[in-house]
Image (spheres, rainbow, N blue to C red):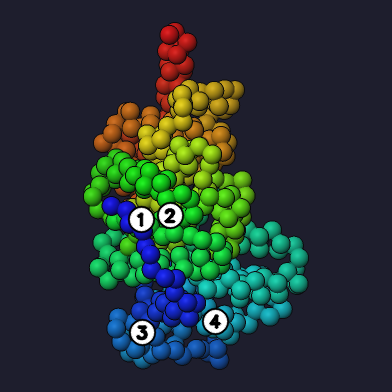
Amino acid sequence: MLSQDNRETNTMQDYARQRGTLYTALVVVLLGAAAASAAEERTPPDNRRITLTLPIDGAQVTGVIARYDTITFTLRTQDDRGHRVLWNAIPADNVNRYWRHLEQPEGDAEALFELGDLLIRHRDGKALAEEAFEEALALDPTLADAVEQSRQGFAPDGTPRFVGVADPAMWGELTDEQMQQGVKSLRAFCEKTQETLNIELSLYQSERFMLLTDIDADQVQDLSNKLAEAYRMTAELLGDDPDGNVFVGKCLVAVFARRVDYIRFQRDLHDTDARGTGGLCHGFGDGHAHIAAFARNSARQTQHILAHELVHAYLHRYKSAVPVPDWLNEGLAEHIAHLVEPPPGDNLYLKSRLELEGKQGLGEGFFETDRLEAWQYDVAGALTSYLLERSETAYPKLIQQIKDNTAADEALKGVYRMEPRVLTQRFKRRLDRELNRKLGQ
């Protein structure tokens, strides 16, 4: 049941206090080998050791930073115990100060860029990141492209954007306290959005969704119903509990009546250039998922986009923080969106067959890229439909194995007994049969 939240908007002081609570329960994590190996581990010189006290497991723990990389640092106590801590779990000001002390990056453009890249992944580090980037660019202007890439994350092409280092403690079964804190954090974000954009927004809530919008109230229930339908379809397809809730409290869904406000929201609240997009999903390292879109002239098109982005949010939360390859992520999103709200007269097989006319394979880098081209979305959706056509029981195993950190090609070969080359050949033959069937009608 959807209900409107009529509470008065909190003050910015209340918001600041809410944000402050994020640091009172510091999360200490053990990262998987894959995440740890992605960053170079360093040992600080003896004359640059930093001693700090942090709240860990309900107690104040004092130690020195014994090792660190661009994701975590190890707090070593006097009894020689090591606690691995995410940099983005401590205040951004401290991250900046500690990193500068450890690395002494002044005069080193690459080191300053590295600092900016670390800070921009912190929920409160954007301003400090820009200071580091400006210092880096003053020393080496050729870093401009790298800086821009760091600022933007994934290109604004509709692909889900993952922000921050994943905290494993926020995946799997969450406690009631974590779920309640998730809702409080989203409410604070909604209040910040209201104040930042300075437009009249209403907040509606259902069991799994927090819908922030300025569209007409009579459209809200339809959108909510479509989101619920997309959630149930995705859960059932993956063998998950359709009556459960994979989100950290709830999933934020922001829908704006005007495109310009959607662009402002993405720019000012997510540091994302969303020009040319109709909707985006942001998955965060703390487990949260944000969906945003603007209302199209066609309500069906808006609902299609939101169903698509909902699947990205679901896959962000499903099982683990391990990302699903883009061809599968976009493929499942398009498959579900076509079931929930199909475009008039649309046939993914026929569209894909026409898109692939004269092309090698499924387009350059289809199985390797993390940024499919726009025309490849329909192909990915048709390929997902084909995999499900072959076996509805094998498909969830494929996704589950990938979420368990099995390489996608290995999982595909193990579950479907096909490598990408063979899958491509059989899929294109299936598309040819669909075209021949259509022509023979």
What's the CA distance linking mark 3 and mark 4? 17 Å
What's the CA distance linking mark 2 and mark 1? 7 Å
What's the CA distance linking mark 4 and mark 2? 30 Å
Q: Is residue 71 left or right of residue 402?
A: right
Residue at the disc numbered 2: 253
What's the CA distance linking mark 1 and mark 4? 33 Å
Which of marks 1 and 2 precedes in the sequence? 1
Residue at the disc numbered 3: 55
Q: Is residue 427 above or below residue 215?
A: above
What's the CA distance linking mark 3 and mark 2? 33 Å
**Residue type beneath disc 2:** Val
Which of marks 3 and 1 precedes in the sequence? 3
Residue at the disc numbered 1: 209
Give the x, y percent position of residue 376.
Answer: 53, 35
Q: Is residue 54 above or below residue 273?
A: below
**Residue type beneath disc 3:** Pro
Q: Is residue 272 visible?
A: no
Q: Nearer the viewer, mark 1 or mark 3?
A: 1
**Residue type beneath disc 1:** Phe
Q: Are marks 1 and 3 in contact (CB under 8 Å)?
A: no
Q: Nearer the viewer, mark 4 or mark 2?
A: 2
**How would you rate the neighbour count of disc 1 (Cα within 10 Å): few for under 14, some for 14-19, many for 20 or more?**
many
**Residue type beneath disc 4:** Asp
Q: Is residue 200 above or below residue 436?
A: below
